[in-house]
């Protein structure tokens, strides 16, 4: 009798149920991770005056980013790139829908607004919201072994004899850098539009900037290797301490710097600025960007 009940339960929690649960998590993730930007006044204004070519480029760049990210943490376990494209499309759609709903709820979308302004506001907000939709699966999912779809939180799959085999995504150097870029982009998008980034960069001296670079790198390295967060990386026996610092931390910080430069350019924060001021602004934004990059290695 119990076996029949278990079979019936399995039938009730088949693939359609898993997809619906994934969609629910995606919608929740889009709201949770996108809310800081959805309630930021600078983002509302950017939707009106942002350069449309730069906005289009940001939306275009977000597509392959979502596809690769979905291949790791899609709404269901993805084994092919076609499934990853499907999940990325769903995430983008959820980001657009949830952004429009929240902006309308906040009274920031009005019927008498020009269509281009409405479209611009939703488009900007949809980028972090779509990333949040995919993050919703990994961060809002169930416990390992009990999650719908049988996802594993330890980043390993079972081999033929039941032995754990490391996930290729988590061991690939290029993909490690990619995940750091995702984390840096996500956190940078939340603060780059604010006036405080430019204000801080104006107030900083070169010594402040140097200290901020050192602290950013130290925090980034400490997050992953020193303070034993869940998911933290451990160095193998015989591996020099400097190996991870040179191979991952420093390149990761450079990735955060490049992402910061791109995001500031996208939002027009670097227009008509002197090279020194551009460098200062990038260093300021790379501080949260580096933290986002380090956190991405832990949670994705």
Image: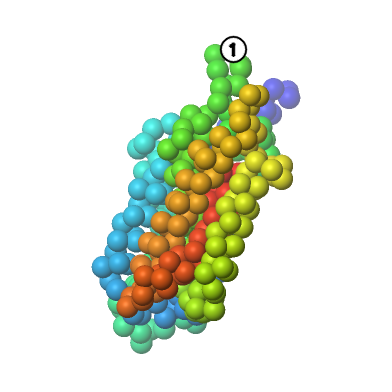
Residue 101: image location, x then y, percent:
48, 70
Name the residue rendered at 54%, 45% in the picture.
249
Q: Residues within 10 Å of mark 1 (few under 14, many from 20)?
A: few
Q: Nearer the viewer, residue 12 or 246?
A: 246
Q: Nearer the viewer, residue 52 or 205?
A: 205
Query: Quadrant location of the C terminus?
Result: top right
* 277 is higher (above) or lower (below) than 140: below
Name the residue rendered at 63%, 24% in the picture.
238
Residue 186: image location, x then y, percent:
49, 58
Q: Nearer the viewer, residue 241 or 139?
A: 241
Outermost residue to the left: 53
Name the residue rendered at 47%, 45% in the picture.
251
Which residue lies under the disc numbered 1? Answer: 161
Q: Circle 1 sits in a helix, a strand or a loop, which is it? A: loop
Q: Disc count in the image?
A: 1
* 1 is higher (above) or lower (below) than 248: above
Quick check: 250 left or right of 275? Answer: right
- For residue 267, say whether it is visible: no
- For residue 57, say whether it is visible: yes
Name the residue rendered at 36%, 70% in the picture.
275
Quick check: 92 left or right of 242? Answer: left
């Amino acid at each position: 009798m119990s076996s029949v009940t278990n079979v019936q339960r399995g039938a009730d929690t088949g693939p359609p149920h898993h997809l619906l649960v994934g969609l629910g998590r995606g919608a929740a993730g889009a709201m949770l991770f996108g809310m800081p930007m959805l309630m930021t006044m600078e983002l509302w204004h950017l939707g009106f005056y942002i350069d449309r070519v730069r906005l289009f480029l940001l939306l275009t760049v977000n597509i392959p980013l979502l596809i690769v990210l979905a291949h790791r943490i899609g709404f269901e376990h993805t084994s092919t790139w076609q499934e990853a494209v499907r999940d990325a499309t769903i995430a983008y759609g959820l980001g657009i829908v949830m952004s429009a709903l929240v902006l309308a709820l906040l009274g920031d979308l009005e019927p008498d607004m020009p269509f281009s302004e409405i479209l611009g506001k939703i488009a900007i907000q949809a980028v972090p919201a779509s990333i949040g939709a995919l993050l919703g699966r990994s961060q809002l999912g169930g416990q390992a072994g009990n999650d719908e779809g049988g996802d594993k939180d330890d980043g390993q799959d079972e081999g033929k004899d039941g032995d754990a085999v490391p996930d290729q995504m988590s061991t690939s150097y290029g993909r490690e850098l990619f995940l750091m870029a995702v984390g840096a982009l996500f956190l940078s998008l939340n603060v780059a539009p604010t006036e405080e980034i430019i204000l801080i960069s104006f107030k900083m001296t070169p010594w402040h900037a140097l200290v901020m670079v050192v602290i950013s790198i130290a925090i980034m390295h400490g997050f992953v290797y020193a303070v034993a967060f869940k998911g933290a990386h451990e160095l193998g026996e015989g591996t020099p301490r400097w190996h991870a610092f040179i191979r991952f931390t420093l390149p990761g910080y450079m990735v955060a710097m490049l992402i910061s430069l791109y995001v500031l350019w996208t939002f027009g924060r670097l227009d008509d600025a002197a090279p020194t001021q551009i460098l200062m602004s990038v260093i300021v934004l790379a501080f949260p960007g580096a933290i986002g990059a380090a956190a991405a290695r832990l949670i994705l």
